Image (cartoon, grey):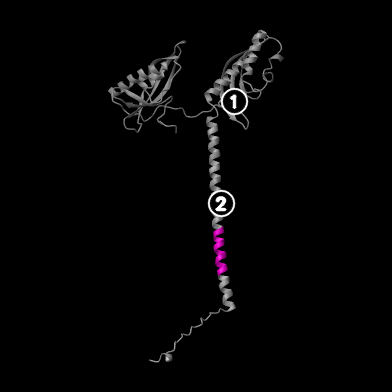
Amino acid sequence: MNLKKIKKKEKKEKTPKVKTFSQKKANRVVLIGASVLLVMSGVGAIRANVMASNVDSLYSKVDTLSEQSKKNNVVREEFDYSALSFYVENFAKEYLNYNSKASDEAKKARIDRLSKYLSLDVKDVDETENLQGNVLRTFKNTSLSRIEKMEDCYLVYLNVNYELEKDKKTENVTQNMVLPIQVKDNLFSIVGRPYFVASSLPQGKTVSLKQTENSIDVDGKEKQSIEKFLKMFFTKYSVGNKQELMLLMKNPTTTAGQDSFVSIDSGDMKFFDTKQKGVTGVQVSVTFSDKTTKLTHTEDFSLWLSKTENSYFINTMKHYFTEKEGND
């Protein structure tokens, strides 16, 4: 074999053809791509704005609810109503009691007591130095009638009654004394001069609360057992011993122990359907007597009773006739 005759064959590489686009087609592709990007960016921007708006709205609602919750807590926790009532009634007593014939020492002691209620100078409040002639002002009684919440204080309205004697002329006066009061940490302070306005009674007429018209029949033996329990309960209720009442009722209501139990109007005792299994509803009128004056008065009660092994237990007690156990 003649090796010289063998020649190496080389493959010819094909040159790739470049596809060409016309300028018109290229412009069209670019325009379509740009349009797609523009639409996508627009949709994205809209969605982003909507989400941002929703988030802002959500934050706004949360802030509003938070502020409202804080305000509600402030109103609920800012002061104890009974403590405020005690405070203003004691101030009214100190303020209204005045005797121009009292000794200088007694007058100074009164001024010192008044100053403890005030955040302003006591001389701005007590103006008895300007009174002329013999004046005797005697406090009789007072009651807290209403409270108005203002921007910078509470206006506390007291219905006050006092006797005014001047130059041997006596007059009985009843009017509203208004006290501007601020509260901090459940402590009270009078921050402005007390002022007086005419008393007004918010009197109206509506339907009185009456015993149930849909009374149910109860077995005679059970009625006797309930009446026996109620006599025992109201005897202890009038004494006002909370420890004993805790064994007889779910939420003990204590009295001042000033009255004595007299009787139950068993003839007018009515039973109503509580729509609760094992719970009996009873409405009854109870008479009490003041231990000092022996003056009697009658109160109405609605009670929800559960049977125990040997007696009864009071789930709920209302001091008026009703068939509604809740607050509605």
Q: Is residue 298 above or below residue 328?
A: above
Q: Is residue 58 above or below residue 293?
A: below
| Mark 2 and mark 1 residues within 8 Å of each other at the beta carbon | no
**Callout 1 amino acid:** Val
Q: Is residue 11 above or below residue 257?
A: below
Element marked by disc 1: strand
Position in image of residue 205 (x %, y %):
51, 28
- Quadrant of the image containing the N terminus: bottom left
**Cα distance between the residues tagged 2 and 1:** 45 Å
Whether residue 39 is in magenta: the answer is yes
Position in image of residue 127 (x %, y %):
69, 17
Question: Residue 95 vs residue 221: left or right?
Answer: right
- Which label was assigned to residue 103? none
Quadrant housing residue 163: top right
Whether residue 71 is in magenta: the answer is no
Q: Main secondary structure of the magenta part?
A: helix
Query: In this figure, which residue is indicated by the disc labeled 1?
Result: 156
Q: Nearer the viewer, residue 58 or 36?
A: 36
Position in image of residue 72 (x %, y %):
53, 35
Q: Decide if residue 136 is in sight here.
A: no
Is disc 2 surrounded by few (<14), some (14 to 19) or many (20+) residues within 10 Å? few
Is disc 1 surrounded by few (<14), some (14 to 19) or many (20+) residues within 10 Å? many
Query: In this figure, which residue is indicated by the disc labeled 2?
Result: 53
- Magenta span: 33-45
Q: Is residue 21 above or below residue 118?
A: below
Q: Decide if residue 70 is in sight here.
A: yes
Position in image of residue 111 (x %, y %):
65, 15
Identity of the residue drawn at 59% across and 16% down? 93
Element marked by disc 2: helix
Q: Nearer the viewer, residue 5 or 160?
A: 5
Q: Nearer the viewer, residue 3 or 136?
A: 3
**Callout 2 amino acid:** Ser
